[in-house]
Amino acid sequence: MASAHPVRVRFCPSPTGNPHVGLVRTALFNWAFARHHGGTLVFRIEDTDVARDSEESYHQLLDSMRWLGLDWDEGPEVGGPHAPYRQSQRMDIYADVAAKLLDGGYAYRCYCTADELEARREAARKAGKPSGYDGKCRDLTAGQIAEYESQDRSFIVRFRMPDETITFTDLVRGELTFAPENVTDFGIVRANGTPLYTLVNPVDDALMEITHVLRGEDLLSSTPRQIALYRALAELGIGTGRTPAFGHLPYVMGEGNKKLSKRDPQSSLNLYRERGFLPEGLLNYLSLLGWSIAEDRDIFTMEEMVAAFDITEVNANPARFDLKKCEAINATHLREMPVEEFTAACAPWLTAPYAPWKPEAFDQAAFEALAPLAQTRLTVLSDITDNVDFLFLDEPVYDEASWQKAMKPGAAELLRTARAKLAEADWRADALKDAVLAAGEEHGLKLGKAQAPVRVAVTGRTVGLPLFESLEVLGRDRTLSRVDATLARLAA
Ligand code: GLU
Ligand code: ZN
């Protein structure tokens, strides 16, 4: 996109609660847009709501962005020409702008109480009229103001919407038009004097020279108001005087075709981290929520995304969050890692609190011997624990369902034969396979059926890494003693 001004976008979450995947998608699209155009990503913290914002959430946001590898050019811990980037540290700026808007007649004091507003809204609804603010305080006389002040009424500051239709071309949705009766005067400063999102967000976009606002569809209704506010700011000489372009990203739908909500467990970024998604796997999937790199192509790197990303190709239709697909994409990224990187990435899941074995029982060489086989099978890194726990536990965790399935009548006989053959075998995967194959033949069983009781006896589960390689790494003594223990248990 040829742009007269260098691209400047922003990611500006409010630090409330845990970061969720919808928020990450917004961050990602802004980041990719900035990187594609060689522009600037501003990371701004919108923390002007003391009742809802938390310091913990602020730290989580930064930590999440760092984990994801979504780097920012201006913002917390990085600084920049428009610092500070936390709105809670910019209150003087907003007070000053609000005063200028009041002085210039772009905003006014609204003395209506919450009860009065509600009663009038209700009446409008009953009469079938639009129920936004009715403009009562728009043009109060000096006498009326004096009267309210003498009653000790508090006031909010309300922005005066121009009485005209607002049209803009959304980068995702095309031309959008808002009629004045649907966009009424709105509050910009609370009765306690603190500024609202409706003020601070466009003021900072203007001051921080933002050229493109890419954000969720849920914010679409605030856009005509913000456009009107930019115009007022321009007339007051605040900021660049230019209104940014807007692109509203599609909703993300969860189960049952409902909007994926922040409270949905499936939406929590921390959950994906704890399960061991790779940042590049998760980001690859999230970039498909509304965008695609090419038909029939699901797997790509962030470098490839950046090279191809075009906001005007984003689809306006709601995108469905599909956990299975997200997992499959992650699994592909896991498989494509260099094996040393994969083994290193497993490390957190091989120690407490994830790993159930004693720390001293862990054997890096044994793990590395099986890691390449695990790498092709995992969906998420945390799966590694269950796949290799039999190597490091004194006794495997016997999964009850697996036991029932494998230890059918005849299993003891098979295990006895297999034990005898294993005891004589060369301790190499191919020879161990021949031993179990031969044991199966004696009992009229194919390899698959014959190896099931051996697998459960030694690893505790019916599914896992390739069995004979696992036995080779586990070693003769431990393998045979587990088979013996299983035979004793079956006899009891
Ligand atoms: N702080 C706002 C939010 O998290 C940002 C909205 C915007 O991108 O304009 O909803
Ligand atoms: Zn009023």
Image (cartoon, helix red, strand yellow):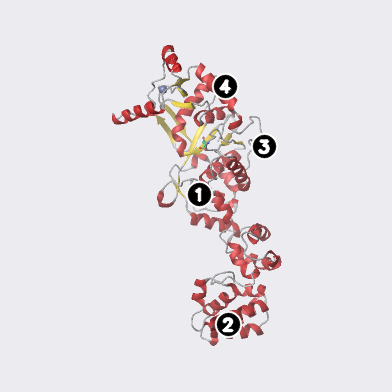
Classify 10 Å Cα crowding around label 4: few (below 14), some (14-19), many (20 and above).
few
In the depicted structure, whether residue 138 falls above or below residue 208: above
Nearest to the eye among marks 3 and 2: give it. 2
User: Mark 3 or 2 closer to N-term?
Assistant: 3
Distance CA(mark 1)–CA(mark 4): 38 Å
Local SS, label 4: helix
Q: Is residue 234 left or right of residue 85?
A: left
Residue assigned mark 3: 78
Q: Is residue 208 left or right of residue 106?
A: right
Local SS, label 1: helix
Distance CA(mark 1)–CA(mark 2): 47 Å
Residue assigned mark 1: 267
Rendering coords of residue 295 (x, y %): 49, 51
Distance CA(mark 1)–CA(mark 3): 28 Å
Q: Is residue 388 visible?
A: yes
Residue assigned mark 4: 96
Classify 10 Å Cα crowding around label 1: few (below 14), some (14-19), many (20 and above).
many
| The residue positioned farthest toward the bottom in the image shown | 442
User: Mark 1 or 3 closer to N-term?
Assistant: 3
Classify 10 Å Cα crowding around label 2: few (below 14), some (14-19), many (20 and above).
few
User: Mark 2 or 4 closer to N-term?
Assistant: 4
Distance CA(mark 3)–CA(mark 2): 64 Å
Residue assigned mark 2: 488
Classify 10 Å Cα crowding around label 3: few (below 14), some (14-19), many (20 and above).
few
User: Mark 1 or 4 closer to N-term?
Assistant: 4
